[in-house]
């Protein structure tokens, strides 16, 4: 692969004439509604790979969308971004699944900063009550192992390391449905909709969120209490009615009609990419898109975006089922062990209803390269939702593995006027 790709570099580089600097979020919003967007460079690059060809040839069937963002450093090491798309279309609905966990993690830390209580930090023990249907109570249980205590910080670790759904539910409830989505709109993501728990709750129940109590970690006394809340006005849905598949499983029965995603979570691939970019390169995004986070918050999130369950030393995930390359779909797929110690991947993934996605930043110290890569595809050949029969292992994960490797190989050959120092994310180990 590397040899054939090297021979194609001059031809592919000649296509750079269609590249432009990445526009700001408010500029992108109008373009997102204009239909699929495809870069000649990325289209040509994808078609050089026989491993990608079966999916690329049927890209519409697989609902494939890709964003590849080149990063070019200037003499002051400031990053400049050039985005290449393949079939990017915000109106092509896909189930974001666990991609929504990244903005929820970020906004939970923002909320702690906004509350500004001296005894309230991401390490404060947390108890969740129940006050409405479909709510789960999670009491505060002390433990000599700090990793086992329910806190905002530990919930974020569980979300980013192993994509834990219950951890997401607890922070969704901490944020509240309306404040969560209103803050996303303020940040430049007005069409995003994060309106569901990962639980079999009806649409109305997801508008109600639980009472929550935080405790002072030093005194074990109550530090802060948040009452149960409700979003009084349901959100509209930017895509209107969304139905997918030819049938779906429900309660052990096959329902012979498409599955309704209209009121499901909605987060376009561009939004997920921009949120990750704003976390990693806050100085490079418009001021209104920057999160209200401390330097320590940024370091904390970057640490757990990069690490895997084992490398993080988080005791709750020490078992063998969490392998060393866990949740790094782009580049490793389902391979158990990372093969390149110089390659660092900061990412968040999604896998649900046949949709498979990964949004990642790659940093390669051996080749002095860096780039952003995001992709989603739909692997549900029988067209039945919720039957548990999806081609994740046979089509989806091998595709993402090959895609990450292809772009990495291309980046290793692409000329860079200024080599990145790649020191932006040197994170102290005591950040945990």
Image (cartoon, rainbow, N blue to C red):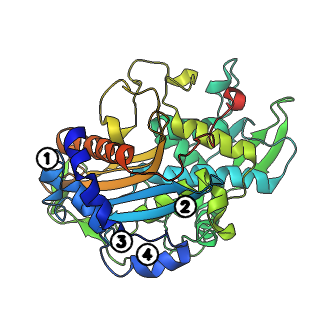
Q: Which residue is mark 3?
A: 17
> Which labelled disc corresponds to residue 80?
2
* Residue 164 placement, left or right of 252: right
Q: Is residue 424 above or below residue 203?
A: above
**What is the distance, in whole Å, between disc 1 and disc 4 at their CAs?**
39 Å
Q: Position of residue 127 (x, y in %)?
A: 68, 39
Q: Residues within 10 Å of mark 1 (few under 14, many from 20)?
A: few
Camera-nearest label, 2 or 1: 2
Is label 4 or label 3 in front?
3
Which part of the image, by quadrant, shows the N terminus?
A: top left
CA distance for labels 1 and 3: 26 Å
Q: Is residue 218 above or below residue 3?
A: above
Task: Report helix, strand or loop for mark 1.
Answer: loop
Q: Is residue 193 left or right of residue 171?
A: left
Q: Secondary structure at mark 2?
A: strand
SS of the residue under disc 4:
loop
Decide which of tag 2 and tag 1 comes sooner along the chain.
1
Return the residue at label 4.
Answer: 237
- Mark toward the viewer: 2 or 4: 2
- CA gap between label 2 and label 1 equals 31 Å
Q: Earlier in the sequence, mark 2 or mark 4?
A: 2
> Cα distance, mark 4 to mark 3?
37 Å
| Residue that numbered label 1 is attached to | 50
Task: Residue 76 in the image: state x and y as whole percent.
Answer: 66, 54
Of residues 103 and 333, the one nearer the viewer is 333
Q: Position of residue 239 (x, y in %)?
A: 37, 76
The C terminus sits in image quarter? top right
């Amino acid at each position: 692969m590397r040899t054939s790709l090297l021979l194609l570099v001059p031809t592919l580089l000649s296509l750079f004439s269609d590249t432009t600097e990445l526009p700001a979020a408010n500029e992108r919003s109008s373009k997102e509604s204009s239909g699929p967007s495809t870069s000649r460079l990325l289209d040509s690059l994808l078609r050089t790979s026989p491993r990608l060809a079966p999916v690329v040839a049927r890209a519409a069937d697989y609902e494939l969308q890709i964003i590849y963002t080149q990063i070019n450093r200037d003499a002051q090491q400031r990053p400049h971004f050039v985005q290449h798309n393949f079939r990017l279309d915000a109106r092509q609905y896909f189930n974001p699944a666990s991609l929504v966990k990244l903005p929820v993690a970020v906004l939970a830390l923002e909320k702690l900063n906004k509350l500004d209580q001296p005894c309230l930090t991401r390490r404060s023990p947390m108890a969740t009550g129940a006050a409405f249907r479909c709510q789960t109570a999670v009491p505060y249980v002390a433990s000599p192992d700090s990793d086992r205590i329910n806190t905002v910080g530990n919930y974020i670790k569980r979300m980013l390391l192993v994509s834990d759904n219950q951890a997401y539910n607890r922070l969704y409830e901490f944020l509240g449905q309306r404040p969560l989505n209103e803050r996303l709109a303020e940040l430049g993501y007005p069409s995003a909709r994060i309106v569901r728990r990962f639980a079999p709750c009806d649409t109305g129940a997801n508008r109600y969120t639980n009472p929550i109590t935080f405790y002072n970690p030093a005194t074990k006394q109550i530090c802060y209490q948040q009452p149960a809340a409700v979003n009084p006005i349901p959100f509209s849905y930017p895509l209107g009615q969304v139905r997918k598949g030819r049938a779906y499983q429900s309660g052990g029965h096959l329902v012979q009609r498409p599955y309704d995603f209209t009121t499901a979570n909605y987060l376009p691939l561009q939004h997920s990419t921009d949120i990750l970019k704003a976390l990693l390169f806050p100085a490079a995004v418009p001021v209104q898109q920057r999160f209200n986070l401390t330097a320590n918050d940024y370091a904390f999130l970057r640490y757990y975006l990069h690490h895997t369950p084992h490398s993080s030393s988080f005791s709750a995930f020490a078992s063998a089922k969490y392998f060393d390359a866990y949740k790094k779909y782009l580049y490793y797929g389902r391979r158990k062990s990372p093969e390149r110690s110089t390659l660092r991947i900061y990412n968040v993934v999604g896998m649900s209803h046949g949709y498979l996605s990964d949004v990642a930043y790659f940093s390669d110290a051996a080749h002095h390269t860096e780039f952003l890569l995001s992709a989603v595809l739909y692997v549900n050949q029988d067209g039945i939702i919720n039957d548990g029969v999806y081609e994740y292992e046979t089509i989806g994960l091998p595709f993402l593995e090959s895609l990450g490797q292809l772009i990495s190989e291309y980046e290793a050959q692409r000329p860079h006027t200024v080599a990145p120092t790649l020191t932006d994310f040197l994170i102290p180990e005591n950040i945990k």
